[in-house]
Image (cartoon, helix red, strand yellow):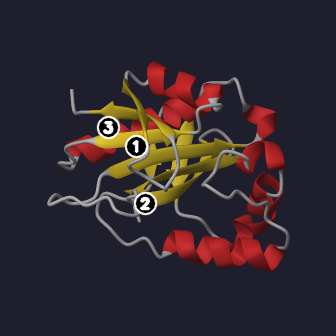
Amino acid sequence: MRTITSERLLLRPWHDDDADFLLDLESRWEVVRFLGVHPTTMRTREDALASIARRRAVDHPIHGIWAVTTAADGRLVGNLLLKPIPLSAGESTDEPNDVEIGWALHPDVRGQGYATEAAQAVLSDAFSRGLAKVVAVTDPGNHASQAVCRRLGMTHLGRTTRYYDAPLELFEQLPA
């Protein structure tokens, strides 16, 4: 998987050495509470290593799940994904699956613009590689991620149940 850079950030593949950070990040309810339909906190370092292995298994020229680090010192600050989004039961399409972008940052670095900067870098990279559209879905109560979507210039399309078998706020971004 490729590395993507921005002014302040380096998005790189996850390494086993990142397991302690990932465990710290995803063992926090405040971080995972909006991740997925049935969020759960990570409990063990072995869970973190297994999750890192799954993240590294994404082998695609555009999609990925990146560790977000500061460019200046390589400090881990979060996670960013760009991957096909699962449709809800009963939903079908003749087109390839939509691709979603999502992020989770450590509470110690929130409010510094890292989510927006990391997402913008990945969107720019994906669109330069020919991706035609990206969606983001948020829990209706996840106002912080909705604000990031708006800062990215994503269009809010309203509430949908098309993905993850749950009512979610849907945002869309097309290439500029």
- Determine whether, in the image, residue 16 is placed left or right of residue 147: right
Q: Position of residue 52 (x, y in %)?
A: 62, 71
Q: Are marks 2 and 1 in contact (CB under 8 Å)?
A: yes
- Mark 3 surroundings within 10 Å by alpha-carbon count, few (fewer than 14), some (14 through 19), many (20 or more): some
Residue 122: numbered disc: 1
Give the mark nearest the N terminus, 2 or 1: 2
Q: CA distance from mark 2 to mark 3?
A: 14 Å
Amino acid marked by disc 3:
Ser
Determine whether label 3 and label 1 are within 8 Å by CB. yes
Circle number at residue 124: 3
**41 left or right, relative to 169:** right
Q: CA distance from mark 2 to mark 1?
A: 9 Å
Quarter of the image containing the N terminus? bottom left
Q: Which residue is mark 2?
A: 64
Furthest residue toward front:
90
Q: Amino acid at mark 1?
A: Val
